[in-house]
Amino acid sequence: MGTIYTAIRGLAIALFLMLLSTVFASVVIRYLGILEGSIDWVEEAARFLFIWVAFLGAAMAFHTGGHVCIDILPRFLSVRQQRLLSIVLEAMVAAFAAPMIWYGTELTVRTLDQPALVLRFSMAWVHAVVPLSGVIILVGALQRMARFLGGLRSADAPSLQEP
């Protein structure tokens, strides 16, 4: 599974670099007055790239544990209670990811025939990141749940405070 996350991370970085370079080029062109001061497709491309970067970034932040968390409550709990809390929290994340996959797929399918205004490719390509990131989040949540469930049976499994 690590190779998939590495590939998705690489994709997110590549898309972010594309976003950065297109917006930078647009600013330079507008400032210098080249090509009548604008490139028609940059705004739409930047918006679509931003959507992909945001969703993939959120999924990868979940995978690496990079999201903000409140860790005061677990400090007052025993290791077993921490693991139980972790299982509940991961179940809540999975419960969020499942509709993301379902409705994201539905949105993607509904927009197969809808072209983007300027770039003219299917809007399904833009919306496909919603179920994709939902799958990444769901798989990560299920993996963590399995690890914490295993930790309930084992005394040496990690607690919430351990990375």
Image (cartoon, grey):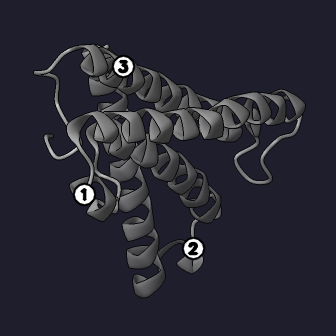
Sequence-earlier tag: 1 or 2: 2
Label whose residue precedes the other's in the sequence (3 or 2): 2
Determine the residue positioned at 34% across, 46% down: 61
- Residue, disc 2: 38
Locate residue 4, reporting x and y percent: 34, 18
The residue positioned 14% from the left and 20% from the top of the image is: 155
Q: The residue under label 1 is which amino acid type?
A: Phe
- Label 2 environment density (alpha carbons within 10 Å; few <14, some 14–19, many ≥20): some
How far apart in space, not on screen, are marks 1 and 2 (Cα)? 57 Å
Q: Position of residue 42 (x, y in %)?
A: 56, 61
Question: For the residue carrying disc 3, how many other residues have a C-alpha within 10 Å: few (<14), some (14-19), or many (20+)?
Answer: some
Q: Are marks 1 and 3 in contact (CB under 8 Å)?
A: no
Q: CA distance from mark 1 to mark 3?
A: 20 Å
Identify the secondary structure beneath mark 1. Answer: loop
The picture places residue 108, in percent across and down from the top left corner, at 77, 32
In this orientation, does residue 114 appear? Answer: yes
Q: Amino acid at mark 2?
A: Ser
Q: Between label 1 and label 2, give the one nearer the viewer.
A: 1
Q: Name the disc covering residue 149, or none.
A: 3
Quadrant of the image for the N terminus?
Answer: top left
Name the N-terminal-most of marks 1 and 3: 1
| Residue 130 in sight in this render | no
The residue under label 1 is: 76
Q: Is residue 152 above or below residue 39?
A: above
Which one is in front in this view, the residue at disc 1 or the one at disc 3? 1
Quarter of the image for the C terminus: give it: top left
The label number, if any, that marks residue 5 in the structure image: none
